[in-house]
């Protein structure tokens, strides 16, 4: 009898906490009670408790996804996001640790066509420290063009920004990918955990070549070009 191994899910999202900083200068989130358990007992009776939360935050909080409207006024907002680009799609992990300027000049276009491309830099290890906001690795405009021309589904990275942010306001990677309607996922984490799991699958002789799928779906909000996601990989 054939047996099916259970899927393994690896969370690639940061935890959102009250007062955390995702990006310098952006508002910090407030996480609080709208209805506390103590207040609920006054409404429903002793021992009957409910909690209703209240979250106030910038759309660029934690691990989030960008769609064209984030960059372009005529681009589609979150309501126009095609789930085929971000839900249970085949994916590849690119190990770019040690590269601060990521050119992707050796990109195998055929291997990434139609897939989610996750760029592992290792920068997520500095999350929650001042180092996270400085000297972060980033893709170049040429790298973005290579990804666009390869026809990737979406692109994720584990850094402060997929573009370089020092000394210039230009954002060629955002401009190129979002004009092509390729979503961007920034501030990812646990790509090292994913890499280890993929290596273990390969060593175990996985018939699928240690493949995985990627999911990062935001709420369907009109008039927004970015929003927090629960991103994860499935082996």
Image: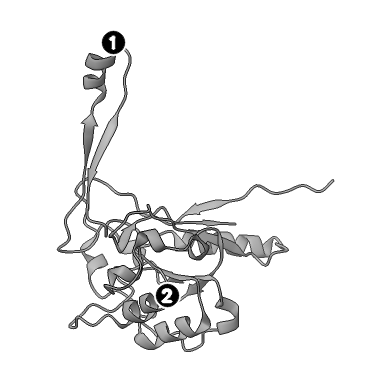
Determine which residue is flagged by label 2: 97
Task: Characterize the local packing of mark 2: few (<14), some (14-19) or many (20 or more) Cα atoms within 10 angstroms.
Answer: few
Asked if residue 118 can be seen in this view, the reply is no
For the point 45% across and 81% down, the residue is: 148
For the point 23% across and 28% down, the residue is: 35
Q: Quadrant of the N terminus?
A: top right
* Image quadrant in which you'd find residue 114: bottom right
Q: Residue furthest right?
A: 1
Q: Quadrant of the C terminus?
A: bottom right
What kind of element bears circle 2? loop
Return the disc, 2 or 1, that comes first in the chain's sequence: 1
Q: Is residue 144 left or right of residue 70?
A: right
Of 54 and 134, which appears nearest the observer?
54
Of 220 and 23, which appears nearest the observer?
220
Residue 74 vertical position relative to residue 16 in the rendered view, above or below:
below
Q: CA distance from mark 2 to mark 1?
A: 55 Å
* Image quadrant in which you'd find residue 21: bottom left
Residue 185: x and y in percent read 38, 65
Q: Is residue 11 left or right of residue 39?
A: right
Look at the numbered discs 2 and 1 and tell me whether their residues touch, using CB distance below 8 Å: no
Residue 202: x and y in percent read 66, 65
Determine which residue is flagged by label 1: 46
Of 120 and 183, which appears nearest the observer?
183
Residue 80 vertical position relative to residue 36 in the rendered view, above or below:
below
């Amino acid at each position: 009898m054939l047996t099916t191994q259970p899927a393994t899910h690896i969370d690639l999202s940061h935890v959102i906490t009250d007062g955390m900083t995702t990006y310098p200068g952006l508002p910090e989130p407030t996480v609080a009670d709208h209805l506390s358990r103590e207040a609920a007992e006054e409404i429903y009776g002793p021992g009957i408790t409910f909690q209703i939360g209240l979250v106030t935050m910038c759309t660029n909080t934690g691990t989030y996804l960008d769609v064209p409207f984030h960059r372009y006024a005529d681009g589609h907002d979150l309501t126009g996001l095609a789930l085929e680009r971000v839900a249970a799609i085949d994916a590849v992990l690119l190990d770019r640790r040690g590269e601060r300027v990521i050119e992707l000049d050796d990109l195998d276009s055929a291997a990434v066509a139609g897939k989610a491309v996750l760029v592992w830099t290792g920068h997520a290890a500095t999350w929650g420290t001042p180092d996270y906001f400085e000297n972060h690795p980033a893709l170049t405009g040429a790298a973005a063009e290579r990804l666009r021309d390869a026809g990737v589904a979406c692109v994720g990275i584990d850094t402060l920004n997929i573009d370089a942010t020092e000394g210039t306001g230009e954002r060629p990677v955002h401009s190129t990918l979002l004009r092509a309607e390729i979503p961007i996922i920034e501030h990812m984490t646990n790509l090292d955990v994913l890499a280890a799991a993929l290596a273990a699958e390969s060593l175990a002789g996985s018939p699928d070549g240690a493949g995985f799928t990627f999911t990062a779906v935001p709420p369907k909000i009109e008039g927004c070009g970015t929003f927090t996601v629960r991103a994860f990989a499935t082996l």
